[in-house]
Image (cartoon, rainbow, N blue to C red):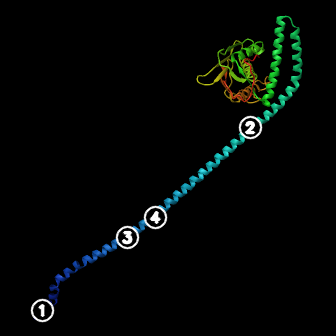
Amino acid sequence: MDVSGNFAPIFSRNLAPMLGTTGKYLELPARYVLPLTFVALVVTFIVWRLQRIELERVCEALKQATELNQQVERERHQAQEEIFRRLYEDRELNKEKFQFQAQLAEYEKYSTLAQLALGAVHGINNPLLGILSHLELELKSASDPEQRWEVEQCIAGTKRISATLRGLVNYARPGPLVLSNLNLHRLAADTLNFLEGQPALRGKRAENLVPEDLPRILVDSNQLSQVLMNLLINAAEATPDGGRITISASKPASVESIEIRVSDTGCGIPPDILPHVFEPFFTTKHGKGTGLGLSISATYVRRNQGEIRIDSVLNRGTTVTIKLPIRQEESHQVKEQSEIVV
């Protein structure tokens, strides 16, 4: 039997079904494409959904972490503000403490000054009255004009000492003001005349530049006179021989007040000392002053509803400016007089 003839039917029988179903085998992948694609999409969706959920979880965790961080920052900021507030309050308390201590020291100075004033009045005023009585008797018996003039000057000086003592008591234990309508030019002239023979003014030129037509001011004349005396003596002591001392005044436009200025061409006041010049017992005249002149002057000016200011330049001079109202509230005792003779 031929090999090909023997096996041909067999091959034919076995291969025929396979060859006859070749199209079916080729069609099997096409039937599964859609399901497989759907499955792939479902799997992809599930994976995407899981990733989305994970991303949302991470975002939520990040959001919570950010909010927590912001909360921590707010709390830290609030804590810092609280610390700063407490530090500020502590600093203010320390400042108030120092101010209170300074005021307490100031009150102690005033208490010492009151005791000093009362002791001075008791120890000086009685002998002074005896001297004044003796001078008045001398004036009655004096016939020589020059002698009478000298006695009158002594009487004026004695009255001035008495007024100064009275002013010192009023400074330590203030009483009511005695207001009067004052001619400022006349007061300046009388004050300069009284100081003309004082050793401090010798060799210096003192000038009255107060206009005569200035409005009268309602003040306590004795206190203002004492202020001018103190300022002029201070100016004279700070001015070398040949220097110039002036009293001037003016009325600023549209302001119901008078500005009085006492100026000198002296040595001036150092900037570190200037803020302390109105303090009681503060003095640079070692052994020669009590440190009360400017303090008393500032108190008198304030009691007359005024202001006082000092401007000074080293080696060029000093100017003290006093600003007083033309009219005060007349709640004090008013003395009816037009001029005060120093």
Question: Which amino acid type is marked by label 3?
Answer: Arg
Q: How many labels, in total?
A: 4
Q: Which amino acid type is shown beneath numbered disc 4?
A: Glu
Q: Report which residue position mark 2 lands on.
A: 103
Q: Position of residue 47 (x, y in %)?
A: 36, 71
In 3D space, how far apart are the residues under numbered discs 3 and 4 (Cα atoms)? 16 Å
The residue lying toward the viewer, choosing from 243 and 196, is 196
Q: Position of residue 305 (x, y in %)?
A: 69, 29
- Name the quarter where the N terminus is drawn: bottom left
Q: CA distance from mark 3 to mark 2?
A: 79 Å
**The C terminus - image quarter:** top right
Task: Give above or below for 175 relative to 98.
Answer: above
Q: Which residue is mark 3?
A: 49
Circle 3 SS class: helix
Q: Which residue is mark 1?
A: 9
Q: Quadrant of residue 253?
A: top right
Of labels 3 and 1, the one closer to you: 3
Q: CA distance from mark 2 to mark 4?
A: 63 Å
Q: Residues within 10 Å of mark 1 (few under 14, many from 20)?
A: few
Residue type, label 1: Pro
Location of mark 4 (residue): 60
CB atoms of marks 2 and 4 within 8 Å: no
